[in-house]
Image: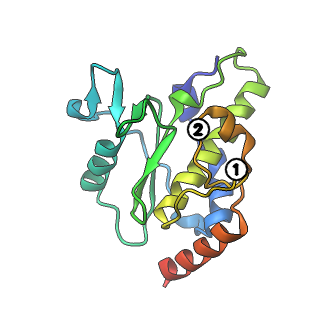
């Protein structure tokens, strides 16, 4: 099985896709050092998971992203929010902060070979695009092939494409246009 912490050592493979999809400027994308101290109150010991919505609030308050900044936290642990058992990721709709959780994206079989690593990278890229889409105001899309489709299972993530449908791309273009002004 692929180690989520090992993947976090170099997540630069997601940058070219995010630059293209969201028209970010290359010089403004920063991969920072990991946050090593996450407050204990964000962890639900009964469930052995982090509270995703609380983590997003904490990231926003702690890191204080400026206007025009989108912060994507890639986390090696498991998380949930609301009444859900887990989440692959979460974002503040129209906000500045999003998170992706590797624990549920890890392929269950394989021993770290290239095929398994490639699958994990594809899942991470899809979830990163999806969650950043939310920060630009996009909601879940009913079209199963659209990147903004809500994945209820990992198979949903595997099946959907990395692209937005025509309606979502139009909404994103309007949002990015106003975001860049």
The residue wearing badge 1 is 144
Q: Is residue 68 left or right of residue 62?
A: right
Query: Where 147 falls versus 46 (above or below)?
Result: below
| Residue drawn at point x = 52 percent, y = 57 percent | 132
Give coordinates of residue 162: x percent, y percent. 71, 52
Give coordinates of residue 23: x percent, y percent. 62, 70
| Residue drawn at point x = 51 percent, y = 80 percent | 180
Tell me which numbered mark, 1 or 2, is placed earlier along the sequence: 2
70 or 131, which lies in front? 131
Mark nearest the camera among 1 and 2 is 1
Quadrant of the rendered image containing residue 40? top left
Density class for disc 1 (Cα within 10 Å; few <14, some 14-19, many ≥20) is some
Q: Is residue 12 visible?
A: no
Q: Which mark is residue 69?
A: none
Give coordinates of residue 41: x percent, y percent. 20, 32
The residue wearing badge 2 is 10
Quarter of the rendering occupied by the N terminus: top right
Quadrant of the rendered image containing residue 120? top right
Q: Is residue 155 visible?
A: yes
Of all residues, the one furthest to the bottom in this rendering is: 181
Q: Is residue 60 left or right of residue 93?
A: left
């Amino acid at each position: 099985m692929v180690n989520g912490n090992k993947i976090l050592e170099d997540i630069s493979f997601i940058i070219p896709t995010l630059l293209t999809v969201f028209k970010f400027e290359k010089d403004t994308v920063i991969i920072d050092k990991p946050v090593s101290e996450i407050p204990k109150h964000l962890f639900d010991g009964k469930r052995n998971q982090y509270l995703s919505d609380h983590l997003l609030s904490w990231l926003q308050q702690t890191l204080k992203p400026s206007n025009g900044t989108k912060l994507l936290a890639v986390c090696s642990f498991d998380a949930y929010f609301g009444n859900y058992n887990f989440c692959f990721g979460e974002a503040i709709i129209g906000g500045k902060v999003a998170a992706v959780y590797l624990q549920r994206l890890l392929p269950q079989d394989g021993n770290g070979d290239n095929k398994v690593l490639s699958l994990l990278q594809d899942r991470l890229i899809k979830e990163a695009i999806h969650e950043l889409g939310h920060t630009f105001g996009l909601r879940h899309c009913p079209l199963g092939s659209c990147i903004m489709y809500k994945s209820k299972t990992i198979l949903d993530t595997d099946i959907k494409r990395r692209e937005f449908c025509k309606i979502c791309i139009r909404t994103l273009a309007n949002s990015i246009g106003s975001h860049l002004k």
